[in-house]
Amino acid sequence: MPEERRAEVVVVGGGLGGVAAALAAARAGRSVLLTEEYAWLGGQLTSQAVPPDEHSWVEQFGVTASYRALRDGIRDYYRRHYPLTDRARRTRELNPGAGHVSRLCHEPRVAVAVIEAMLAPFRGSGRLTVLHGWVPVAAGTDGDRVTAVTVRRDGEELTLVAPYILDATETGELLPLTGTEYVTGFESQGQTGEPSAPETADPTNMQAFSVCFAVDHVDGDHTVDRPASYAKWRDHRPPFWGAKMLSWQSPSPRTLEISTRSFTPNPDDDPWLVDADQRADPGDGNLWTFRRIAARRTFADGFYPSDICLVNWPMIDYFEAPIIDVPDAACQVEKARELSFSVLYWLQTEAPRPDGGTGWKGLRLRDDVTGGDDGLAMAPYIRESRRIRAEYTIVEQDLSLAVRGDKGAVSHADSVGIGMYRIDLHPSTGGDTYIDVGSCPFEIPLGALIPQRVENLLPAGKNIGTTHITNGSHRLHPVEWNVGEVAGVLADFCLARAVSPRAVRHTPALLADFQDRLTADGVELRWPDVGGY
């Protein structure tokens, strides 16, 4: 029989939502078991190597206090440990990478260090135990309750038991294991009434995932071995792409017009002129500076021989097949890694340069930055998860700027947080191109965190009650953190009051007390008067 471990809260998955959930529950005095498949906690911010995708007001409001502490901690880490220029050190809103996608582009390892520091007191006290390398493989249930989750590492198994089980995995792995009802892929317009939904539902039609990587540009020839599938990817032309996938041309997500992007390693631009505001510009015109995570002019002269560029670009999106509820998920992930290596090889050997030449042999893969054994990110960047069938499903009409206009997003009496991002869907496995819809700043309803039937399993990441469409605005860093934090606080609240999450939502006095608790913890429940984009 597997060894048994008990706690008051079990959190499976150590991405941003899982970290926030574990932190919230441990701060409340609960014993917590947190599992994570990879060596780094932090998910999309760290092991997946994606700089934070955030809204335009992130420096003023619109995120939880603990998420702000994470962001502040990242900046403080740079100030304490990196040789910044005097100007950079004095800058309150330091953007170490001066990337255009975010006001805080940074190296993944820094976020790892800050997350570890935030959790360290609770690990030291024994309230929190982190189990690295473990993945869920089975679960026990009793009626509408989950009794245990079994996790496995290198053939060894553990059974984790707790009154509350939180699913913070990247793909909602606990949902099928526990029999919790869930949805995948595209819902139909008849099911949701969403303007952007198709006529026919397709559970296998899911957003692309990507395997990111980091490069710099230095002297010497750093060309990687030619990938076995390189010829396939070099010549691949998706029907909606307007060009070969490995080219500087691709559809503009917002207009679908074929646009041409540039790529200029180490452009020697002024990092203080970068205005990372997605309202005005998506920032992807120059792919080098788009998701740059280290701008050498931010640091002491000569300390960085090159900028560091994080490659999370359209051409590495893998939408050949889904990886959820299929028997060959691992094979598809390997094919995605081959695509990313093919993109790198193309950049080094055949990519057109502005001077008429081809390739940049000085592009060097920075495996030390991303931590992956093969040089790429440790983990694939998963945009779309299984989603619970929730008491309330968030639909496009709740937040679409085109639908809601000046009225703003639907206001929810059971709001447990706020978020903002355009409804941003990448190409999908059914052959669909981008869907990119303007969004209103929205509230996160508690009903989207409560399964229709199961009583003690809570979603703590991208597996809340959204649709395929609205997942596009709820999958980003600060919203995932907010969801996880609320799940952790809700587990503590229910344990303290001996009530169910469902009762909290449906009992006005309990709901008011819970929302007061969230507010006291620094979770914002309503937006000020700001417009969408």
Image (cartoon, helix red, strand yellow):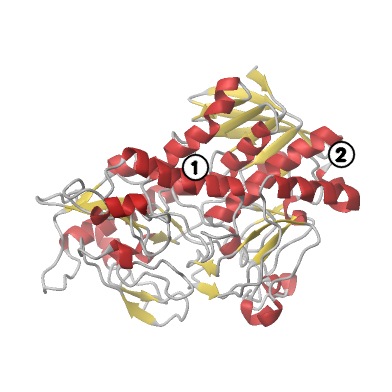
Which residue lies at the image location 36% right of the left edge and 43% below the top edge?
79
Q: Secondary structure at mark 1?
A: loop
Seen in the picture, residue 149 relative to 91 is either above or below; the reply is above
Q: Is residue 354 in view from this perspective?
A: yes
Q: Which residue is mark 2?
A: 499
> What label does residue 42 carry, if any?
1
> From this viewpoint, is residue 229 visible?
no
Q: Quadrant where the C terminus lies? A: bottom right
**Foreground pick, 32 / 268:** 268
- Indicate which disc, 2 or 1, sits on the residue closer to the N terminus: 1
Quarter-wise, where is residue 392 in the image? bottom right
Q: Is residue 241 above or below residue 478?
A: below
Left or right: 328 as drawn, with respect to 507: left
Measured Cα–Cα span from mark 2 to mark 1: 30 Å
Q: Amino acid at mark 1?
A: Gly
Q: Position of residue 344 (x, y in %)?
A: 25, 56
Q: The residue under label 2 is which amino acid type? A: Val
